[in-house]
Image (cartoon, rainbow, N blue to C red):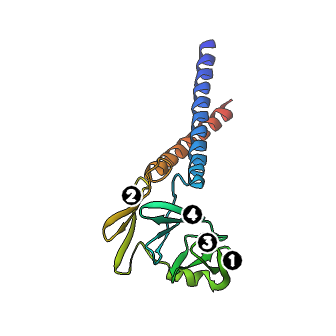
Amino acid sequence: MFCDEAKRGASTFVVNLFFGIVIVCLFILFFGRMTFISSGEIVGSLQGFDVDSNGNIYLGTKNKIIVINNGERVESIVPPTSRSYCFYIDSDILYIGCASDSKGGTYDLNGNEISYGGFSYSQIKEKTKGRSFTVDKHEYTISCNYWGAYTVTRDGNVVYQTASSFFDGFTYWFCLVLLSVVFVFFVLVKLSQYYRA
């Protein structure tokens, strides 16, 4: 009798211990990614992509536009819009769409507003460039590998590359899904222990 209770207590301790470890790992994965993205250590999802007349590359992320010059990040523009990756450049003017009110505006290359509301979000989205385009006879492409590193090329030569990070790419998402499945498993184990008691 005593031996059975000791075994049950030990198994409950082990389940609680692993349950706690899984919760801590999920917390680290979620908030670690948010911290790295907000600090600029990792880029997150790159979607907007364009070039100005000086050859500076503009990469749009969820809430900012990163400016690249000679392979170095020189500036981050944080326009007062949501989804600032929806943009294009024409005559060195940024046209940025705002998804929250379905409007768009014009900004100088430093992110200062020139006008707002003269364009719709869909009008701007239609003119955004894809993953590959040609400007002044130079072909620009952007690609991403499984580990979350983005590579920008100009005429086939790498001009900018983001660093791979555990908190971005395939590894991160694989670990997050795996830990989520384990978390659900432990919740079910805990519920079965509760109803058996």
Q: Position of residue 190 (x, y in %)?
A: 63, 35
Which disc is residue 111 wearing? 3
Distance from label 1 to label 3 (Cα)? Answer: 19 Å
Quadrant in the rendering for residue 188:
top right
Which residue is under mark 2?
A: 145
Residue kind at label 1, given as amino acid type: Asp
Q: Nearer the viewer, mark 4 or mark 1?
A: 4
Q: Nearer the viewer, residue 44 or 95?
A: 95
**What amino acid is found at the position of numbered circle 2 in the picture?**
Asn
Choose the circle earlier in sequence order: 1 or 2. 1
| Lateral position of residue 127 relative to residue 133, left or right | right
Give whichever of discs 4 and 1 has the lower sequence position: 4
Mark sitting earlier along the chain (3/2): 3
| Label ID, residue 101 | 1
> What residue is at 67 percent from the left and 81 percent from the top?
116
Spatial CA span between label 4 and label 1? 23 Å
**Mark linked to residue 167:** none
Relative to residue 100, is residue 35 depicted above or below?
A: above
Cα distance, mark 3 to mark 2? 30 Å
Residue indicated by mark 4: 76
6 lies left or right of 143 = right
Image vertical order of residue 32 relative to residue 131, above or below: above
Mark 4–mark 3 distance (CA, rounded to whole Å): 9 Å
Label 1 vs label 2: CA separation? Answer: 33 Å
Q: Work out whether mark 1 precedes mark 3 in sequence or the reverse, and give the earlier one.
A: 1
